[in-house]
């Protein structure tokens, strides 16, 4: 099965889930962040300072979203990345819920909330973007030893 076919299958399966099914498969914190657009408290997430190499996937559906090679330390309290694995892996929504304009990042496969992306903050990265992502929204799959 090709990668696109796999992503389409994940997306179709996730879209078919009911709210009750999401509540059953996710912990209360995961549900609050992934399905209700919540945010974990800064500096509390398991991946804030992680430097393990691997791929970060959506905790709700398993879609691969970010690589550790694009992760950087921004000292903002959440894991930061300068780009997604591919642009078709995420989708963007304008968010003005906190009295300011922000861009929400969601998993393209299952529409789960990941965090937000900010531009023009002056970080020394190739894109000058900071994808500020909740640890609880992701699961790190470490690279196999020796790769």
Image (cartoon, helix red, strand yellow):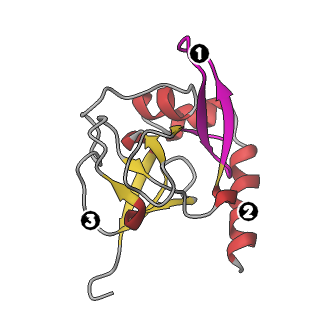
Front-lying residue, 11 or 50: 50
Q: Nearer the viewer, residue 12 or 101?
A: 101
Mark 3 lies on residue: 52
Q: CA distance from mark 1 to mark 3?
A: 33 Å
Q: Is residue 146 above or below residue 138?
A: below
Q: Earlier in the sequence, mark 1 or mark 2?
A: 2
Circle 3 SS class:
loop
Residue indicated by mark 1: 97
Q: Residues within 10 Å of mark 2 (few under 14, many from 20)?
A: few
Q: Residue at x 31, y 35 (%)?
A: 76
Could you tell me which residue is drawn at 31 percent across and 69 percent down? 53
Q: Quadrant of the N terminus?
A: bottom right
Magenta span: 91-115
**Dot 3 alpha-carbon crowd within 10 angstroms: few under 14, some 14 to 19, many 20 or more:** few
- Dot 1, how many residues are within 10 Å of its Cα: few (below 14), some (14-19), or many (20+)? few
Q: Secondary structure at mark 1?
A: loop
Q: Circle 2 is placed at which residue position? A: 9
Numbered badge on residue 62: none
Q: How far is mark 1 from mark 2, CA to CA?
A: 32 Å
Residue 23 in percent (x, y) is at 54, 31
């Amino acid at each position: 099965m090709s990668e696109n076919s796999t992503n389409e299958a994940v997306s179709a399966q996730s879209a078919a889930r009911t709210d009750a099914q999401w509540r059953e498969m996710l912990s209360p914190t995961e549900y609050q962040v992934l399905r209700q657009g919540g945010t974990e408290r800064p500096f509390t997430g398991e991946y804030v300072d992680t430097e393990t190499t691997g791929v970060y996937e959506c905790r709700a559906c398993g879609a691969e979203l970010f690589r550790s090679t694009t992760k950087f330390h921004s000292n903002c309290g959440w894991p930061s990345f300068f780009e997604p694995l591919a642009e078709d892996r995420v989708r963007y929504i304008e968010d003005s819920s906190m009295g300011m304009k922000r861009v929400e990042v969601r998993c393209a496969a299952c529409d789960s909330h990941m965090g937000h992306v900010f531009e023009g903050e002056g970080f020394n990265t190739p894109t000058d973007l900071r994808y500020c992502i909740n640890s609880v929204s992701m699961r790190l799959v470490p690279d196999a030893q020796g790769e």
